[in-house]
């Protein structure tokens, strides 16, 4: 009797499970006019951590790579094709197709970098390969002249070697991290400008020691606690 | 970066705090610390980041402008903006450089004996006011006019409308948005009775299929296009490019379908035909929420002066509509449009599939169209028949090209027939506006006067004697430009131009006023998704440059309207916005208060009970719905949207033996509109230094034209020589050419045609007949 | 001149109490998290003894469940 009850209840259970699952998938499959919208999606102000580890599988290769001093970039040339500190760089070479938005024709070289005979240089690696409409932000130079001269002044750029708290302290990150979360793409490998090339790419958790230092909206000065009783 | 940091202890404290915060973040992902603490992250350099909407297109990206020593030196995307989530396009990133061209206008200039003489702002404003008085005395109120822009901030447009319509008493108020958005407006009004999209950008996150109707989004709305690409990466959505020319968008799309110019009308009808034939109609939706109506046909092209048209809507039945569609079977349409029946069925199948959410996107391809209102109606038909409207992911979405085409021109209503709330033809609307404006209701004339093309024609004829042009460059953008340039230069016309740089339009001016642009003053813009965004003044304007708002207020005071223009200089933007909000004080259009705009990266209207309305007409999201059903199209008296019977009619000027090619004009990603700002940004000018004519490689081969060769384009209006571009940025279909219009040295609009949509009065810049030859 | 930062976990429901208690102490800065029961404390004292005293005071607070040091610095003089 007990055995039979057990078998019956097993089948009842299976049947109920079937109905529940069937119902669920039926409602899933139905076109619903209403999508509950989560209004409280706060966009985090502390820079996203996504991407920090993105190129970490190459970290050991980076560490073992010899430095090609003849073809290394420096910060000076790095800023050459940027309108201001933090601006998207313009494209210093001819492009394969004007009609393509970028995508694979750019990523071929700029996804992983590598030496190109044609330009006698290492291709810089993009920190945001998932954004494939490259030409939305990066444009080539087709002329040297200007339509009208400009009075725009490039703002100041951070100086290397001056952004550690004390001697030997880990330098802080002086630039914004938006779209630049992937540290190794610019700070490691042969295309990294020599001044900012990291000496220890194998320690991939960069932001364990290097913290961002970039004013996000506006400065409120040094934090003071409200009930000062000093 | 810490060279400026003197207090090492403070710095160490920051480091200590920050490392603790970082540790907390790694332990509890998503942890948030109070706003003040986040802002207190150690500072870098002297940069102050302040938020603003981007100066350029209608997408309305949130940007953060970096200010150092009183100058704007850097831009980054605002990660808190729901529009762009931190990404910009190349124009946005370099936008601050547009303020620093070294030929900025800094002093008022008055034309005396053929040369421009510097004067003071006071004198220039006195002169403008006295000229206006004189013109009104000699030629009547309707001889003075103002021509503004979708780049007007909300306060600019509001004071212009108040001065001209409310105080002076003329409906001679127009804006360049007539040239880009008017068909979208009349499309919305005829189909739904209320302007502006029911959906919003968030639809992109829910839709499964995107159909781009004649819209090169990869170049013109790149930030939104990147959101599409992002969704494709994450969810595998489909992007269909339906266009007349192969572009970057076609290359990026999953499918590119080419059609012959003007035949989008036929294809849209064919899609409806297929939907009905295959039983994909959402019957309960159509029965509850839609009416069928037909309008006049053979409605003309507006080529003659004083052209007038009034549509005669007539109710029809679903059966009548089905009979009408018999002429638009895919097989029949294939012959007109060059689109294979298979491709038409392919698109129809996506629209018809009840399990696919579809978003249609369009901009100038559908709006700058001699049947612009019709094609807008027809795309709504597709969405209404299938019930795919007003819900997340199912969204016909009309994009805009100017930062405040919606916010100022459409919402404030700086068009001849419009008031901030309603139209001048309606007595109650006039009374409502007059009360807020504190003017006698008789002041506001009940008849609209001139739409943009007709306004410039009136200037040519001499019916208009005084025109004030602000933030726009009509001497580059008017179609059939030569007529209107010559007209503006005639004796007895007085033209005032407010701008920031010398342009072909300042060349025709009698007085040039230097304007303060964008973040050199305070203001608001409204983008395509009904989002109003505020920006503060971040830097000082150069020289005597003054905001367009204050220029108008100063002139209004000089004309004796101190009572209506009571605003104080320090707080006038806030006062004007608060007054403006009173016009929209209802559930269907309520605007967010200024404090809310200041705190957020923009806020969508209708703003009801402290919340934005993301999907209008859907009772789950829109508190203005009141019929107890799921949907309520409350713009129409009976609460029903209209499915319009609109036929295919040919373009105003089609290629013939003498002029065998189609001429299409448009933009490129690097330059914005007439390039008066973007060409002064070195990065952008270097990338795209001059205009060109794109040819089909087959045509080029036959004519033995190679890239760089000079090509002469001839139309019935004139001729122009441009360098050829073959197989570069875009590839037009055979027997078609494309020319971008940003280059003031190669004014393509000298040869375009001033035909327009009889309903919206928006010119068609995309189609006229041209001949090409190698020179 | 030690400067140290800690993460402090309050007993359940006693976050506000803890914030108040720590704020009352000298040489302490408090940065509470908005959506989690965790508080960042930064201390700045003149001598090591003072630092030790402060730590004792902190640990004596009844609403505190756990105090974890994250970083510590020592600078020679105040400027």
Image (cartoon, rainbow, N blue to C red):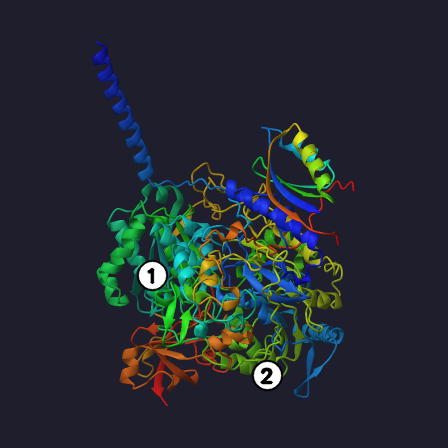
Residue B507: quadrant of the picture: bottom right
C6 on left or right of A121:
right
What is the secondary structure assignment of the residue under circle 2? loop
Q: Nearer the viewer, residue B568 or B415?
A: B568
Give the class, few, some or many, for how many residues have Cα within 10 Å of label 1's Cα (few <14, many ≥20). many
* Count of numbered marks: 2
B745 on left or right of B321:
right
Numbered circle sitting on residue B490: 2
Provide the chain ID for the residue under circle 2: B
Tell me the mark number nearer the camera, choosing from 1 and 2. Answer: 1
Q: Nearer the viewer, residue A90 or B613?
A: A90
Q: Nearer the viewer, residue C45 or B405?
A: C45
Return the x and y of residue B531 as percentages of the image width and height: 54, 53
Q: Earlier in the sequence, mark 1 or mark 2?
A: 1
Return the x and y of residue A186 as percentages of the image width and height: 47, 63
Return the x and y of residue B155 as percentages of the image width and height: 64, 60
């Amino acid at each position: 009797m007990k055995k039979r009850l057990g078998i019956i209840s097993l089948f009842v259970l299976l049947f109920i499970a079937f109905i529940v699952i069937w119902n669920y998938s039926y409602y899933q499959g139905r076109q619903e006019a209403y999508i509950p919208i989560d209004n409280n999606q706060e966009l985090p102000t502390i820079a996203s951590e996504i991407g920090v580890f993105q190129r970490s599988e190459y970290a050991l290769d980076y560490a073992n790579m010899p430095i090609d001093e003849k073809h290394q970039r420096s910060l000076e040339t790095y800023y050459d094709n940027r309108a201001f500190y933090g601006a998207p760089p313009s494209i210093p070479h001819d492009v394969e197709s004007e009609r393509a938005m970028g995508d694979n024709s750019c990523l071929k070289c700029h996804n992983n970098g590598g030496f190109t005979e044609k330009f006698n240089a290492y291709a810089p690696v993009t920190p945001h390969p998932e954004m494939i409409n490259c030409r939305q932000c990066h444009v080539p130079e087709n002329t040297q002249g200007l339509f009208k001269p400009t009075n725009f002044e490039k703002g100041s750029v951070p100086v290397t070697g001056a952004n550690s708290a004390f001697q030997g302290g880990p330098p802080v990150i002086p630039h914004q991290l938006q779209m630049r979360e992937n540290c190794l793409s610019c700070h490691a490998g042969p295309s990294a400008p020599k001044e900012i090339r990291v000496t220890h790419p194998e320690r991939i958790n960069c932001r364990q020691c290097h913290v961002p230092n970039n004013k996000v909206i506006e400065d409120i000065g040094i934090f003071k606690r409200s009930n000062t009783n000093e | 970066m810490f060279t400026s940091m003197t207090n090492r202890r403070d710095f160490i404290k920051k480091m200590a705090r920050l490392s603790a915060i970082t540790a907390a973040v790694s332990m509890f992902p998503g942890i948030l610390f109070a706003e003040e603490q986040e802002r207190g992250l150690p500072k870098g350099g002297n940069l102050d980041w302040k938020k603003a909407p981007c100066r350029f297109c209608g997408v309305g990206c949130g940007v953060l402008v970096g200010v150092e020593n009183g100058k704007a030196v850097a831009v980054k995307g605002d990660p808190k903006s729901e529009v762009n989530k931190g990404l910009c396009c190349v124009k946005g990133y370099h936008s601050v450089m547009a303020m620093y061209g070294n030929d900025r206008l800094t002093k008022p200039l008055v034309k005396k004996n053929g040369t421009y003489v510097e004067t003071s702002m006071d004198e220039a404003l006195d002169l403008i006011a006295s000229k206006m008085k004189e013109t009104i005395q000699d030629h009547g109120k309707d001889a003075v006019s103002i021509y503004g822009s979708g780049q007007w901030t909300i306060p600019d447009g509001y004071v212009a409308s108040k001065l001209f319509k409310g105080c002076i008493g003329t409906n001679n108020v127009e804006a360049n948005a007539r040239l880009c958005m008017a068909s979208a407006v009349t499309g919305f009004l005829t189909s739904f009775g209320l302007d502006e999209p029911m959906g919003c950008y968030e639809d992109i996150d829910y839709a499964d299929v995107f159909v781009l109707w004649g819209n090169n989004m990869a170049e013109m709305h790149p930030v939104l296009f990147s959101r599409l690409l992002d969704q494709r990466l994450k969810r595998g959505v489909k992007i269909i490019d339906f266009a007349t020319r192969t572009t970057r968008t076609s290359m990026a799309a999953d499918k590119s379908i080419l059609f012959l110019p003007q035949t989008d009308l036929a294809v849209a009808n064919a899609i409806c035909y297929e939907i009905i034939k295959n039983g994909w109609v959402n019957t309960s939706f159509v029965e509850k929420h839609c009416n069928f109506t037909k309008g006049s046909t053979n409605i003309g092209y507006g080529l003659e002066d004083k052209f007038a048209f009034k549509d005669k809507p007539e109710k029809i039945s679903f059966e009548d509509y089905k009979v009408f569609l018999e002429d638009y079977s895919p097989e029949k349409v294939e012959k007109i449009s060059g689109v294979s029946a298979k491709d038409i069925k392919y698109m129809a199948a996506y629209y018809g599939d009840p399990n696919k959410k579809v978003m249609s996107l369009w901009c100038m391809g559908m709006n700058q169209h001699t049947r612009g209102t019709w094609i807008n109606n027809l795309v709504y038909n597709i969405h209404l028949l299938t019930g795919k409207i007003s819900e997340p992911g199912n969204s016909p979405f009309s994009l805009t090209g100017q930062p405040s085409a919606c916010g100022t021109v459409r919402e404030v209503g700086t068009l001849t027939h419009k008031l901030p709330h309603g139209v001048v033809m309606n007595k109650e609307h006039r009374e409502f506006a007059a009360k807020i404006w504190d003017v006698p209701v008789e002041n506001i004339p009940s008849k609209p006067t001139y739409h943009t093309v007709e306004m410039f024609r009136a200037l040519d004829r001499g019916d208009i004697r005084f025109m004030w042009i602000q933030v726009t460059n009509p001497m580059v953008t008017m179609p059939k430009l030569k007529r209107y340039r010559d007209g503006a230069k005639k004796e007895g016309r007085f033209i005032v131009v407010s701008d920031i740089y010398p342009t072909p339009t300042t060349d025709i001016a009698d007085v040039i006023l230097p304007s303060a642009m964008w973040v050199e003053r305070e203001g608001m813009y409204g983008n395509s998704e009904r989002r109003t965004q505020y920006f503060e003044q971040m830097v000082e304007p150069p020289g005597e440059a003054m905001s367009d708002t204050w220029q108008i207020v100063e002139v209004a005071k000089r004309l004796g309207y101190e009572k209506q223009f009571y605003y104080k200089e320090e707080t006038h933007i806030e006062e004007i916005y608060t007054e403006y909000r009173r016009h929209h004080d209802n559930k269907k259009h309520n605007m967010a208060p200024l404090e809310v705009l200041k705190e957020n990266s923009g806020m969508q209207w209708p703003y009801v009970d402290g919340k934005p309305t993301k999907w209008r007409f859907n009772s789950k999201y829109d508190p203005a719905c009141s019929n107890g059903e799921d949907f309520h199209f409350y713009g129409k008296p009976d609460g029903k949207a209209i499915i319009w019977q609109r036929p295919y009619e040919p373009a105003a000027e089609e290629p013939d033996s003498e002029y065998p090619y189609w001429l299409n004009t448009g933009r490129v990603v690097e330059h914005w509109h007439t390039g008066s700002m973007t060409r002064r940004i070195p990065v952008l000018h270097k990338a795209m230094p001059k205009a060109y004519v794109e040819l089909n490689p087959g045509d080029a081969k036959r004519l033995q034209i190679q890239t760089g060769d000079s090509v002469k384009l001839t139309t019935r209006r004139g001729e122009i020589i441009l360098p050829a571009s073959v197989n570069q940025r875009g590839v037009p279909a055979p027997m078609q050419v494309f020319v971008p219009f940003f280059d003031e040295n190669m004014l393509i609009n000298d040869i375009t045609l001033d035909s327009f949509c009889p309903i919206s009065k928006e010119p068609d810049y995309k189609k006229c007949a041209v001949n090409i030859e190698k020179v | 001149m030690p400067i140290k930062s800690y993460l402090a976990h309050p007993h359940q429901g006693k976050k506000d109490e803890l914030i108040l208690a720590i704020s009352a102490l000298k040489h302490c800065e408090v940065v509470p998290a908005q959506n989690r029961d965790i508080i960042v404390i930064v201390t700045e004292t003149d001598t090591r003894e003072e630092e030790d005293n402060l730590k004792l005071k902190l640990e004596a607070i009844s609403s505190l469940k756990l105090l974890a040091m994250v970083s510590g610095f020592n600078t020679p003089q105040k400027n």
